[in-house]
Amino acid sequence: RPGMAQPTGLIRAKNIILDRRESLTFCPVYKSASTSWSINLMQLRGVWEEGVLVQPRMHDTFAWIANSAAPIVTQNTTRFMIVRHPFERLLSCYRDKFEGAKKDYYYVKYGQKMVRMYRNVYVTREEKEAMLNEIEHLVVSHKKLYLPNNPYASPPGPTFSEFVSYITTVRHDDEHWRPMHQHCSPCNINYNFIIRFENLQTESYNFIEYLNRTEQIKPRWDNPTKGGVTTTAVACSYFSQLTSEMVDKLVDKYRKDFELFQYSPSDYMKCSQH
């Protein structure tokens, strides 16, 4: 805004896509239609092909900018991002990457740490490591897990409570649950359009019409949460596994997202254990 000091703080420009030809800047928020809109942008460029991996093709097609240059090189572009209720996004991440995961990547990188740190099973350290190693071997081998005498196999990945305990304790955030304001730096990059996931199709169509690109972009909605849309009852069944103190920690973690993008945690707080 005119007369205001230059914003300060960390800019994660590596998360921001710059399309110089179309004069567009997009920050893909993971678990918030990032895949769908990445494909839309590649359609606009004429480089999208069914079956190709989205992320490598995006890296090959679009410019990725330096942190210090981001506010300057993007200021004459149309800048947009898609936001989602922080707790809906978090639950979508858990269901997709851990509970219903078809690949072992997130179990190996994070899931076994979560289980190791927060599952209270009274066994010796040696027994614990042996049980966890047994599970990891089967997960990586993509074999069916049925280990009735192994408490770490019930379930083999983290429960929602273990997942929340981990992300509210450790300092590092994976991009799939990193707060949106940290991921896209809206205090440094002044976004012209903020599309809400809750009204994704209508607002996306309106945005495409604004760009005058209805012929080039045929919107699609990829990578939905397994099991369909998360209803309030389903979400509450997960948040009922958390204590009120755990939900308070989540609210603190995502407080700026709630404030900046005008969401409320109140419905989820009612679901927690008291």
Image (cartoon, grey):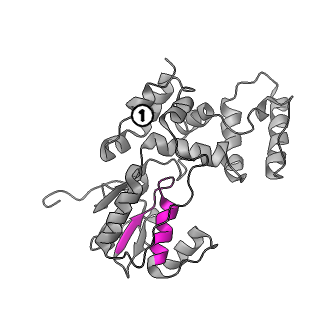
Where does label 1 land, which residue? 251
Which of these two is toward me, 118 or 89? 89
Q: Which residues are magenta?
A: 24-43
Residue 48: x percent and y percent? 54, 77
Question: Where is the N terminus found, in terms of image quarters?
Answer: bottom left
Which residue is drawn at the image coordinates 45% and 61% (left, top)? 28
Residue 125: x percent and y percent? 80, 29
State left or right for residue 237 relative to residue 189.
right
Q: Residues within 10 Å of mark 1 (few under 14, many from 20)?
A: many
Type of amino acid under label 1: Val
**Is residue 125 magenta-colored?**
no
Question: Does residue 69 sit above or below 221 in this rendering?
Answer: below
Q: Based on the displayed image, in which of its 4 quarters is residue 57 positioned?
A: bottom right
| SS for dot 1 | helix
Which of these two is toward me, 212 or 144? 212
**Is residue 35 magenta-colored?**
yes
Which of these two is toward me, 61 or 218? 218
Which of these two is toward me, 250 or 53? 53
Residue 133: x percent and y percent? 82, 41
For this orientation, the residue located farthest to the top is 274
State left or right for residue 103 relative to residue 185.
right
